[in-house]
Image (cartoon, rainbow, N blue to C red):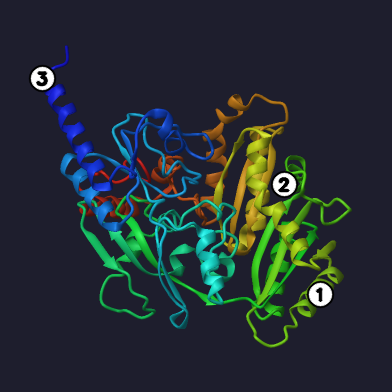
Amino acid sequence: MAAPAAVAEARTRDAALDRIKTVVGPKGWIEGADAMRPYTEDWRGLYKGKARLVVKPATTEEVAGVVAICHEFGIPIVPQGGNTSLCGGSTPEDDGTAIILSLGRMHRVRNLDPANYTITVEAGCVLADVQNRAADADRYFPLSLAAEGSCMIGGNLSTNAGGTNVLKYGNARELVLGLEVVLPDGRIWNGLRGLRKDNTGYDLKQLFLGAEGTLGIITAAVLKLFPKPTDVRSAFCAVPDVASAVTLLGRARAESGDAVETFEFMPRLVVDLVLKHFPDTHDPIQTRYDQYVLLELVSTSSGESDLAAKLESILESAFEDGLVLDAAISQSEAQRQDFWKLRENASEAQKLEGASIKHDVSVPVSRIAEFYAAALKKVMAVDKTVRLVAFGHVGDGNLHYNLQAPEGSDGKAFLAQWERFNRVVHDTVVEMGGSISAEHGIGRLKREELAHYKDGVSLDLMRTVKAAIDPKGILNPGKVL
């Protein structure tokens, strides 16, 4: 027979959940393990949690009402957008005490101001939809990710997402002018200002950008827009090695007038895996090479663009100097998209291939080649059968230094070595002044790694901020710290 205290606690909890259901209405909640499964399991399949309830508020006021009740009763909240986190940042723990607060119903574009080059959107807006709305107004929102068809802007901002255009436009936090945030006690902070200059004290929005929902729930944002590109030219280039790729990047930036928007590195193994698992993809260059880069130039000039001539000139001189071995230049948008399929399907191809140990790391661009070789040497010393699948945004120093299980091997046995390989790769990153998380965040996956590598003063400051803003610790518990 249950103790009286336990019975009373259960009744109080059920009463709180009933109040939450009333706040969001009959269309605003889901319960039952099977119905909640799309929300309680992460994209990679690494984390499978439990929740009391999935709540789907439709307005900021409903979010605030739910959070206020959770604050009153000490109910943990896991904020969630498109549930595309690669670090378990939007997956609840398996104790089943939390509710998931899904922002997918909050998908309005509140304001589009072409003259101010801003768009104000709610957190549940899918990234691709934000891009399209900007394009309809002859403007450009440059944040671009492989998951842009399903990830949501609130999650992008909460994780400070990176993507393929960071080289030219910066990470997600650099694309934000203002935020609306529901605080852990249910209050609403309205910082939705489209100002590029505002020196009235602390820049409070920066507290919530990259905080992974541990300090507040982002419900809306004012985002920067840019002139819409009038011309885009792409080349898929074979390069002798990583060092040559970095040299090519510097030359392309200088000779194009810094028109390089994208510079993505891919080894042959990535191309092979994508070709294997995605039949509609094609090899742009018939001859096989060990390393490739996807280089893209953009122009926003309203006049006739000489971008094609610039790209050809850059590649011609690079070929003469041995920086490029071969190249295919896109002759149509369809061919350009064929290039991109090889890059954008890289992560999914790895998933289909089997077990892999992933490292989202960054080092100074000048040390990319050094890191690539040094980490590989150390990885091979641990296990010579590992397949290195290192690809990504060399233009901003970010490599997805992933280790694929040997073909036909035991995936579970390989994943059991995760911590061992982490130490090898992350030690090398830190030795070179880099970061163990370039763009995916910390979540649950890298929580202990952060504690291991982050300096004590930084960790103390982070804990102080968390305790001051969320003293009950109800927002996304167990993530980051």
Q: Which residue is denoted by mark 3 in the rendering?
A: 4
Viewer-nearest residue: 303 or 426: 303
Q: Which mark is residue 312?
A: 1
- Decide: is 54 above or below 8: below
Label 2 secondary element: helix
The quadrant the C terminus occupies is: top left
Furthest toward the front, the residue is 26
Residue at the (85%, 56%) spot, across then down: 285
The location of residue 410, given as percent across then percent down, is 65, 24
Q: Residues within 10 Å of mark 3 (few under 14, many from 20)?
A: few
Q: Mark 2 or mark 3, which is nearer the start of the sequence?
A: 3
Q: Is residue 338 left or right of residue 219?
A: right
Earlier in the chain: of badge 1 and badge 2, it is: 2
Quick one: label 2, few (<14), some, or many (20+) residues within 10 Å? many
Report, in whole angstroms, how far the alpha carbon at label 3 lies from the one at label 1: 78 Å
Sequence-earlier tag: 3 or 1: 3
In the rendering, which numbered label is found on residue 382?
none
Residue most extreme to the right: 287
For badge 1, the amino acid type reads Glu
Q: Which element carries disc 1, helix, strand or loop? A: helix
Question: Which amino acid, mark 2?
Answer: Val
In the picture as drawn, the residue positioned furthest to the left comes out as: 4
**Residue 352 visible to the viewer:** yes
- In the picture, measured across the screen, residue 384 lies left or right of residue 312, that is left
Secondary structure state at the residue bearing disc 3: helix
- Which residue is at the far bottom? 303
Q: Measuring 46% from the left and 54% from the top, which residue is drawn there?
A: 152
- Residue tagged by mark 2? 270
Q: Is 416 on the left-hand or right-hand side of 187?
A: right
State the separation of the CA atoms marked 1 and 2. Answer: 26 Å
